[in-house]
Image (cartoon, rainbow, N blue to C red):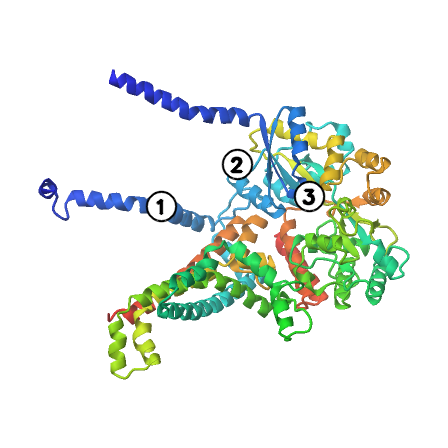
Amino acid sequence: MKRRQFLTTASALGATLALPAFSKRAAASTTVSVLLPPWSTLPKDMADRFTSQTGFGLDNQTLGWDDIHAKIVTSMVAKTAPADATEVDWSWVGQFGAAEWYQPLDGKIDAGLIADLPTAKIFTFDGKLMALPYNNDFRILIYNRAHLQQAGVKDAPKTPDELLDAARKIKAAKVIDYPIGLPFSATEGASTAWYLLTKAFGGDLFDDKFEPLFVSPDSAGYKAMAFQMQALKEGLIDPASTGLKDVDIQELFKAGKITFDIAGWAGNIAVYSDASKSKVAKDVAAALMPSTTGKSRTFGLPGAVGIPASAKNPEAALAFAKWMLQPENQIESYLTLGNLPTRTSVLEKLNADGKLYEGDKLLQQAAVVEPLFAQGTPGWYPQFSSAVATALNQAAKGQATVDQAVKQIADGAKAAQQ
Amino acid sequence: MSHFEQTKPAPGTRHDVWLGLGFAIPIIVIMGGLVFVPLASTLWDSLFRIDPMRPGTPFVGLQNYAGFLTDPAIRQGWYNTFVYVVLAVILETVGGLGAALLLSRIKYGRRWLLAALVLPWCLPPVVNAIAWLWIYNPSYGLLNGALHAMGLIDQNIVWFNSRSTALFLVTVVHVWRMMPLTAIILLAALQSIPQDLYEAAKLDGAGPIKCFRMITLPLIAGGLAIALSQSTVFALNLFDEAWVLAGPSLDTRTVIIQVYMSAFQNLHFSQGMALSVLTMIVSLIISALYVMRVYRETSYD
């Protein structure tokens, strides 16, 4: 009898302990976990709407952009998914694609939707679509209209030289101390600003065989860096920018401490023009990226949602990725989080409704967005980008000349490609 | 009690062996699982090419190690790390010893002073570094503000634009955090010295400096070796302070930051493993030198 009682008690205890595990597993099958950066984490209203519309629960996980990369790498090496759906930045496509860490989405997305997503090709690796772009980041010149007026500058600059002249006038008129905002810390934001200026000077970083095109003094990349160093030397850029990231530049712009956010994030115009978040909401304006050739150029740095190969709930993750691209959700994500829609039709609708601040300029710039690498982002991009940021940081500190810095970057590119 | 005495086995019996083994098993499992197995695995894997972007994991021998000689970023990382180690060990030892001597002489409120001293050590390193990041900020930082107020500078200084200043300032943050540990180790050593020795020395006419050199220093040598070893190992593994204050900037980049960048940014895992193995070997060699030196110094005891 005692033994029977013991067995009964033990069985009941076992069942009691196991029950939560089973119920947890059952709940997990209807809950999609998503790992996104702070600027893409859905507010509660949107999360609730996702659940009511799709039937899946939403487990929002937020991490800094760099930390997401580290978490994905460590998880995938351990053959576990960090979440059912994660951020996939354009710059990670080469690495994650080569490692085959993400599920191909070909055949799972409507062709009409893909056609409406011009940046989808940036997330194609080896012919396979590995993520769906939801955040249409590209760079555009953002400036403070009032500063220009106070210095007697009538129009937004159209060339790099005009940009320098305008900055000199603003400084001479003592409107502000440092009119140009550019980051020079050894971070990704410094690298992307140089890539953008290389295009502004009418060139590219590499040829079709990934041979560097920026070493010669008459190359666009060389001129772009010389432009940056000249602005720094003339006191048009804060010397403290050697420690500033792109997000710090954005804070300076919002505080009215700089005139030009040269490598401005297109979606940030929504934040800059929001009086609750910016002191210069009435004065913010956008212009096409200055160019030496007369044709404005820019490149796309979109963010996407991808599904790790080992995701537990791939169907729910796919539902989330598709839901993020629905017009009403893209619009709300723009208005609340500043994520510019990736669908052309949504951008046009926002502009037609008058909800896209500086919409005409944004659409004009969006029309000329190109990928940074025509061949697709290579797997060695993060290593190359780190070499660029390091060299720029040293040049800005006066520890390397432009000549030495571009040669250092070329050596870094060569080492990264080995 | 008597029953226990009757059944207690004689020393050296099988029972003692099993008991000893039982006590040792937890540490064997913990050290084996968390130190020796990962160490052996890392050593082995560092001889292969492990890169998730490339197919296969071919054996490459010492190729991952050879690459370090030619990479200027890694050479700079080693240089920076050695500067941190030298500066940190000197500052932590001198400062820690000073603080310990001071605390050992204080009779009232020592516990409060001790609590204040260990506070930086208790804080997470990232929190410490962020606080110092504000202090060093060129626009609104306390350091520039204080120097302005004292009339020593007339325009703000961007501290991290100078390589040597940047290295020193990162070291200061690390020392700020780690010096309390050195002070506590040395304070414990100081408190174990019998006061009779000092009284006898005074009677023989020894002054404070001679007392320190002939009594204090030799008798805290064991503690000093531990303090020096931990200072060296922690400085060799410096990451948080340099990363928070200057990111991956080459001026302040340590070898451990380079390990992180190789493995987790560039996905060259085996290169990261090889670099971490080298760092561990350097740590072991320096620590062994300290311990052997101190053992020689104190063996006459």
Residue at coordinates 47% horizontally, 52% vertically from top-left?
B61
- Place residue A357 in its image quadrant: top right
Q: Where is residue B277 in the image (x, y as percent from the top left)?
A: 45, 55
Residue at coordinates 58% horizontally, 66% vertically from top-left?
B166
**Mark 3 to mark 1 CA distance (whole Å):** 42 Å
Q: Which amino acid does label 2 sit on?
A: Thr
* Closer to the eye: label 2 or 1: 1
Q: How crowded is mark 2: few (under 14 residues within 10 Å), some or many (20 or more)?
A: some
Q: Mark 3 points at which residue?
A: A90
| Outermost residue toward the top in this view | A1
Choose between A253 and A163: the one closer to the eye: A253
**Mark 3 to mark 2 CA distance (whole Å):** 22 Å
> Is residue A136 left or right of B107 when viewed as pictured?
right
A374 w.r.t. B153: above or below: above
A217 w.r.t. B20: above or below: below
Query: Could you tell me which quadrant the N terminus of chain A lies in?
Result: top left
Q: Name the residue under label 2.
A: A80
**Mark 2 to mark 1 CA distance (whole Å):** 24 Å
Q: Which amino acid does label 1 sit on?
A: Ile
> Is residue A151 left or right of B163 when viewed as pictured?
right
- On whether disc 3 and disc 1 are found on a single subunit, the reply is no
Q: Name the residue under label 1.
A: B30
The local secondary structure at tag 1 comes to helix
